[in-house]
Image (tube, grey):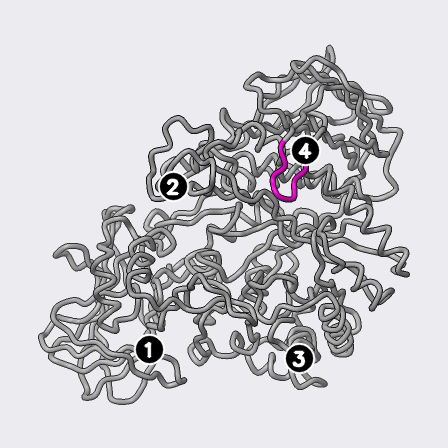
């Protein structure tokens, strides 16, 4: 490891002990940037819908579901799946992303889908279904009901552990006036139902459903839409929100993020943004168009757009950051988006439109990213290095004309990419490049013969390799005339994927799930939901801090049900270990780093994992910061050895009080994670550490700790 001003490593040959000397006399000339503790959210899977958004039902707008195929379009993005057998397989494997309970019959879901009933819904009784067209041109659902009490339903769980009342909003009409009902039922019990008088013209009807206190909080419930008599109903949407929603956001998600002092949230993509038209997601929600998700499985109902994102950030207490569509979008569209968010309602066209939509005050969004991974052929309208420079120039000029005070970031690649992407950008745009983005999604494919310790250690040492490359990028930017260059790491997570069919995987059949005798399995590898992600992120963040003011922000992937952060299933929310790891580290935000002298052994690997070269780094990582008389030291054990390391702490230039607070996050195995059944398996423990005779404690493998010392 190359020593820096903030970390000096002395090699020892004792893996059981380490000594950390904190020199508070040697302080950095900068404070830790709070935006290094940010997060990222994208319209992918259940990150937004059935994630941070509180709406409970799946496909509540009865739209035509898009199943992403395996083939890419030459112009970028993926084709829709059309093979019947593959669609059936996708539906059968869709229960987890749907947030459906395992009791749901996937064969029934597929049969309903083939009968032109919107994916996720099932027939109640003998009904005929067909597509129809709603009042705004979206797909609606026609339901021909021949017997009283028949209709459609959806199975779901409800957040009954915290709330019993639910708000619904539906948009529907009938060929002839009729009485419809929306009900919550299970088996033969009707817990609540509301009668709706439905006329021949489209109408939006709202109401409340309430369940008694003694219902099963983990039960499976049916939300039914039926008619009292034979009828021909056409329904465009049926939305269901818990009564405690926070401006239609999930209150538990908001609370988790608010309590963790989240500083910044990036949106709306990710690959999604390269085919996203922001104008689809503004204005009255029930009038917004439905679109096929341009990058992933699913349908984009545009229930969560710009205003909803900004409101979410305000409730969390974080700053919003937007990545604009530089794929199939235009500079003019991006400029209008900036104006919509930041324009004066009296002086700008888009500012006036925002006010018309109910938001007279500007959103004042500062950070704007021009494009996402435009070098990748999975991106809608991907481009060449020269094309990226051309797009950056055009977009930057148009966006700054809309608001000269915004800060824009160019689309970059990981610094060690074997292509001239970043250099061409700098050659063509020079000092106009303020900041360059990077997505270090490293790891690649692994299989049953991969050594788990070698893989784990490779991840834990990757930050050292990566920040050397980032330091070279800063040099390139300065040589190109960028006076105050910035690095924005806008996506980060462990990115190894298990490929059982790979050569050497030890199994002939990729569908076989018997991993007996294999070194690594999907259940025993480091993933974003495991304790490994928390350790990995801490190492990455520490090395970014050591880059000084060059590292401007880090938005970790992701927020809910994507990467690591929060998980939500069956309307229960819990936190991954990395959520707690980030919360532990936020004490560094705004504090001043001081020098750490570290004596410990090293971890060394011999294997390359795609971007990750063999590593040779200290087995312990440490970052110390001072803030208002408090010294905080975050220590990470990067070694996978099974035995704890005895940590001794010394101080120079700081006399601590006799007691300190020790907060530890760790687990017994690198693959330990929190689940719906065990949501607190990996959570922080807090203890008091005596400093009277010197500060010392044991730090197990797969753990990190923060020690807070008050000045004596």
Labels 1 and 2: the sequence-earlier one: 1
User: Which secondary structure lies at badge 1?
Assistant: strand
Residue that numbered label 2 is attached to: 676
Q: Which residue is mark 1?
A: 236
Q: Is residue 528 magenta?
A: no
- Tell me the distance, in whole angstroms, between the alpha carbons under discs 3 and 1: 30 Å
Q: Residue at x 43, y 38 (%)?
A: 522
Residue placed farthest to the top in the image? 693
Circle 4 — which element? Answer: loop
Q: Is residue 17 above or below residue 560?
A: above
Residue 526: tell me if it is visible.
yes
The local crowd at label 1, few if under 14, some if 14 to 19, many if 20 or more residues have their Cα within 10 Å, is: many
Give whichever of discs 3 and 4 has the lower sequence position: 3
Provide the secondary structure element on which disc 3 rests: helix
Which residue does the image show at 78% across and 37% down from the upper left? Answer: 627
Q: Position of residue 203 (x, y in %)?
A: 32, 83
Left or right position of 709 against 244: right
Whole-Å distance between the Cαs marked 4 and 2?
36 Å
Question: Label 3 belongs to which residue?
Answer: 336
Quadrant for the N terminus in the image = top right
Identify the secondary structure beneath mark 2.
loop
User: Compared with residue 144, is residue 662 higher up or lower down, i.e. above or below?
Assistant: above
Label 3 near label 2: C-beta < 8 Å?
no
Range of magenta residues: 607-613
Q: Count neighbours of disc 4 (C-alpha within 10 A) and say few if under 14, some if 14 to 19, many if 20 or more.
A: some
């Amino acid at each position: 490891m190359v020593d820096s001003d903030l970390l000096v490593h002395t090699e020892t040959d004792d893996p059981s002990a380490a000594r950390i000397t904190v020199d508070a006399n040697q302080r950095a000339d900068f404070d830790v940037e709070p935006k290094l503790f940010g997060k990222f959210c994208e319209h992918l899977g259940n990150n937004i819908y059935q994630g941070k958004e509180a709406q409970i039902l799946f496909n509540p707008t009865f739209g035509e579901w898009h199943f992403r195929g395996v083939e890419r379009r030459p112009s970028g993005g993926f084709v829709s799946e059309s093979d019947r057998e593959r669609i059936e397989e996708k539906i059968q494997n869709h229960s987890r992303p749907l947030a459906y309970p395992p009791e749901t019959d996937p064969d029934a879901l597929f049969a309903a889908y083939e009968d032109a009933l919107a994916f996720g819904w099932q027939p109640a009784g003998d009904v005929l279904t067909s597509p129809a067209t709603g009042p705004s041109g979206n797909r609606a659902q026609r339901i021909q009901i021949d017997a009283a009490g028949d209709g459609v339903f959806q199975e779901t769980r409800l957040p009954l552990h915290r709330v019993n009342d639910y708000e619904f909003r539906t948009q529907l009409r009938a060929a002839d006036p009729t009485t419809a009902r929306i009900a919550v039922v299970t088996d033969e019990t009707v817990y609540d139902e509301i009668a709706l008088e439905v006329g021949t013209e489209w109408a939006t009807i709202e109401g409340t459903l309430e369940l008694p206190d003694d219902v099963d909080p983990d039960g499976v419930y049916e939300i039914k839409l039926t008619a009292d008599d034979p009828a021909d109903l056409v329904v465009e949407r049926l939305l269901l929100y818990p009564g405690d929603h926070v401006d239609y956001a999930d209150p538990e998600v908001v609370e988790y993020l608010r309590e963790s002092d989240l500083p910044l949230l990036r949106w709306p993509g990710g690959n999604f943004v390269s085919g996203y038209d922001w104008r689809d997601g503004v204005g009255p929600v029930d009038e917004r168009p439905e679109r096929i998700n341009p990058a992933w499985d699913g349908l984009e109902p545009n229930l969560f757009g710009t205003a909803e994102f900004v409101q979410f950030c305000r409730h969390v207490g974080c700053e919003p950051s937007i990545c604009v569509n530089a794929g199939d979008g235009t500079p003019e569209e991006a400029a209008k988006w900036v104006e919509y968010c930041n324009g004066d309602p009296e002086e700008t066209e888009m500012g006036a439109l925002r006010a018309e939509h109910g938001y007279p005050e500007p959103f004042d969004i500062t950070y704007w990213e021009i494009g996402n991974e435009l070098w990748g052929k999975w991106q809608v309208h991907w481009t060449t290095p020269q094309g990226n420079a051309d797009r950056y120039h055009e977009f930057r000029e148009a966006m700054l004309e809309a608001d000269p005070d915004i800060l824009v970031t160019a689309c970059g690649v990981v610094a060690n990419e074997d292509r001239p992407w970043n250099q061409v950008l700098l050659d063509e745009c020079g000092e106009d490049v303020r900041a360059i983005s990077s997505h270090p999604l490293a790891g690649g494919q692994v299989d049953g013969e991969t050594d788990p310790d070698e893989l784990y250690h490779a991840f834990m040492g990757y930050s050292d390799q990566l920040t050397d490359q980032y330091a070279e990028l800063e040099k390139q930017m300065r040589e190109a005339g960028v006076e105050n260059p910035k690095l924005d790491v806008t996506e980060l997570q462990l990115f190894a994927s298990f490929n059982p069919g790979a050569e050497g995987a030890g199994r002939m059949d990729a569908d076989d799930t018997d991993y007996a005798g294999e070194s690594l399995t999907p259940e025993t590898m480091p993933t974003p939901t495991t304790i490994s992600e928390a350790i990995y992120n801490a190492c990455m963040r520490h090395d970014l801090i050591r880059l000084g003011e060059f590292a401007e922000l880090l938005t970790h992937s992701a927020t809910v049900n994507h990467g690591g952060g929060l998980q939500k299933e069956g309307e229960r929310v819990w936190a991954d270990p990395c959520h707690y790891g980030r919360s532990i580290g936020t004490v560094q935000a705004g504090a001043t780093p001081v020098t750490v002298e570290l004596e410990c052994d090293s971890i060394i690997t011999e294997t390359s994992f795609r971007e990750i070269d063999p590593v040779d780094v200290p087995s312990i990582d440490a970052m110390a910061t001072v803030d208002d008389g408090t010294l905080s030291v975050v220590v990470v054990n990067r070694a996978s050895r099974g035995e704890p390391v005895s940590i001794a702490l010394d101080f120079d230039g700081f006399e601590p009080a006799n007691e300190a607070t020790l907060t530890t996050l760790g687990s017994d195995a690198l693959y330990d994670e929190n689940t719906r059944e065990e949501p607190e398996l990996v959570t922080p423990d807090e203890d008091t550490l005596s400093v009277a005779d010197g500060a010392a404690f044991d730090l197990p493998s797969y753990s990190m700790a923060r020690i807070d010392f008050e000045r004596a």
